[in-house]
Amino acid sequence: MLALLLLASCADWVCLPEGSPGAGLVYDVEVPDLSAQTRLRHHSWDAVLRLETLDEDIGGLVRRVDYDHLVTDAEAWKALEDSLSTYAGVDPSALESHEEQLAYWINAYNAWVLYAVAAAYAQDPAYNVEADGFLIFTTPFIQVGEWTLSPNDVEHGIARGYEEQAYADEATRAQAERWHDELWGDRAIDGRIHMGFNCASASCPSLSPGALQGSRLYEQLDELSRLYVANTAYGAGPQGISTIFNWYAADFAPVFGSVQAFIEEYREGGTADVDFGTFLTYDWSLNAASRPSGEDETCASPW
């Protein structure tokens, strides 16, 4: 199912899934040399998020992907590919600040995962990331310059510094460790990163309605945090709290002290109704939404 993207070279991408624009054709996408960039605005990825995601009310506000439109509209697909070529051409080490680097890594992860999932969805609309044993997260397909990384390399290795992360080889491990050190320096790991990374599943914190920006990254992560812990179906409520807070409890301790303190800080209206002793069953079904028939395609409001 994940045999959806072959990187023949840094510039030639073969898109395999039937049903997506240009299925079976070789895309000769020239990766721009953005290695001197010190700041990014994430234009293409921002457009994808604003035009190809929709708000729904499921225990609170969530943001879902309009996969049906994304995989059948050539312009939308091209915008997503453009975002990938941008992220492939950037040198993360050249970005000028912690915030610029972290916004890059989260946006790049989300864009590449969305591309992989959308390609799989084009073959099988019943696809979800659990169906193939979470192969999507361990397969290297994220291109960053000369390096090819798996989603786990980015989230658990570079962002979290998880020492047990399995890499394709020792050279990749060494590079990921350098990126991790450049990213955090003397800073403590901040649990809000888990509000930014999106695993394309229902229980995951929603994609942002626009690209994360280095200039206001933590304001955006704050808003995503508030939205998630306000959601009683997936985040925090009378039935329990997200399993994310079990898996990554240690990541919330350095900045917030504990998972409970994090939820208390961001849950508007208080936590008297929250069952902190129970973890919600994680819903791995796809974070998919269908645009209502006849609805105009309009940009999401800037945030």
Image: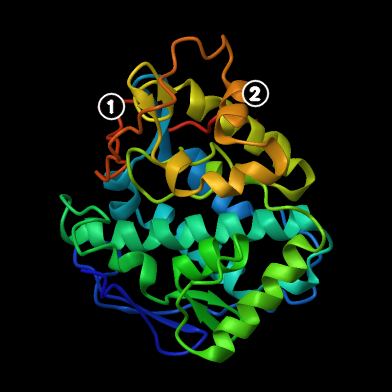
Residue in the image at 19% along x and 67% along y = 18
Q: Amino acid at mark 1?
A: Pro
Residue in the image at 27% along x and 56% along y = 129
Give the left or right position of residue 170, taking residue 139 as reference: right
The image shows residue 15, relative to residue 200, as above or below, that is below
The image shows residue 13, relative to residue 222, as above or below, that is below
Residue 252 position within the rendered picture, expressed as x and y whole percent measured from the top left: 61, 42
Q: Which mark is residue 292?
A: 1
For the residue pair 40 and 180, the one nearer the viewer reads as 180
Residue in the image at 61% along x and 24% along y = 266
Mark 1 to mark 2: distance in Å? 35 Å
SS for dot 1: loop
Give the left or right position of residue 42, taking residue 148 as reference: right
Give the left or right position of residue 100, taking residue 246 as reference: right
Q: Amino acid at mark 2?
A: Glu
Residue 176 position within the rendered picture, expressed as x and y whole percent measured from the top left: 61, 76
For the residue pair 184 and 68, the one nearer the viewer reads as 184
Residue 178 position within the rendered picture, expressed as x and y whole percent measured from the top left: 70, 77
Write down the residue under mark 2.
265
Q: Residues within 10 Å of mark 1 (few under 14, many from 20)?
A: few
SS for dot 2: helix
Residue in the image at 68% along x and 36% along y = 256
Q: Quadrant of the N terminus?
A: bottom left
